[in-house]
Amino acid sequence: MITSARSSPSSAPLSWITPAQGKTIEAAGTTAHRLASGPGGWVERLADDVIISYKHDAARDEMAAGLNTWCQKAAWQPVRVFHRHMPVKNADRICPVLYSGDATLPLTTVVTEAGIRYGLDIGASYSHGLFLDQRVNRATLHELKPKRVLNTFAYTCSFSVVAALAGAETVSVDLSRKSLDRGKHNFTLNGLDPAGHRFLAEDTNELLPTLAARGERFDAIILDPPTFSRSKTGRRWQVEDHFENLLNAALEVAAPKCAILLSTNCTTLDQTALERRARWCAKVKRRSAEYIRHATPPDFPAGHGASTLWMMVR
């Protein structure tokens, strides 16, 4: 079990999974997961590599020492270890820095999750390309086997990949064409033809009314918006203020039976707050729904990772 049971990451000590947990995760075909989480940062295994993401030097040093101890117990050594500083201001973010290992190896790599392949870019300053805390939700989507999936704020399209592997037609929407191109690469890594799916470099908030006007309907919708963003025209969007508008627009394209994933990293919107707002939207749109809460993956202690909720619309 994870050693920390506290719900707040600001007060919880650094918490490591056990080597036995690591072997269990890997036996399930997953080579990308957390090794440790704490108030000062986290440690991720990405196939043969490790990234230590830290907020201050003391946390970096604690996690580096803990990694050495964990690797000795697990009889496993990463090929490379990267350090990534996580400053308060996003504008100050820099790419991970190689701490140990072969500097001639490429910064791109491929990891697996439940046997599904994803291409990562360790050199990216914000994220390498796969949000590890969404592992359970990706598995849920695959099990649902939807026919038509709308993946908004799709980033590198991991949800679209699992849906397509389950036989779905997918529409992936993101402002970044570069991210969508990486998503297409994830399709090809898994033997999927991207030409059979749609990738739209557009603003989700502007696109949803257009899709509704066209009569498009989906039986699964992924809503995992950023906490804060600006559109190409400079329009400010913040999840705390505009979440209901987003969900109401998504309900307009929800089929009579539709599974909607609600997810956010905003610290003021936990599962209870998400459900409260979702219930209000369902009432406004005269839709009934059930709400399903899943636990975070075992490598994410309580208080770490995104707040998520499945809204099963009827």
Image (spheres, rainbow, N blue to C red):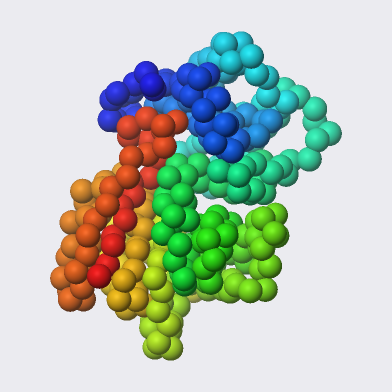
- What residue is shown at x 76% (from left), y 24% (from top)? 101
- What residue is shown at x 60% (from left), y 44% (from top)? 115
For residue 140, above or below residue 180: above
Horizontally, residue 118 falls left or right of residue 230, namely right
Q: Position of residue 139 (x, y in %)?
A: 46, 49
Q: Position of residue 31 (x, y in %)?
A: 60, 35
Q: Nearer the viewer, residue 166 or 4?
A: 166
> From where the camera sits, is residue 145 visible?
yes
- What residue is shown at x 59% (from left), y 38% (from top)? 29
Instruction: Give the number of callouts.
Output: 0
Where is the C terminus found, in terms of image quarters?
Answer: bottom left
Horizontally, residue 163 falls left or right of residue 193, namely left
Q: Position of residue 289 (x, y in %)?
A: 22, 64
For residue 291, above or below residue 288: above
> From where the camera sits, is residue 249 visible?
no
Looking at the image, the residue that sits furthest to the bottom is 214
For residue 83, above or below residue 147: above
Where is the N terminus found, in terms of image quarters?
Answer: top left
Looking at the image, the residue that sits furthest to the right is 104
- What residue is shown at x 34% (from left), y 21% (from top)? 4
Horizontally, residue 90 falls left or right of residue 123, namely left
Horizontally, residue 300 falls left or right of residue 273, namely right
Residue 181 falls in image quadrant:
bottom right
Q: Position of residue 265 (x, y in %)?
A: 38, 47
Residue 215 falls in image quadrant:
bottom left
Q: Nearer the viewer, residue 67 or 94?
A: 67
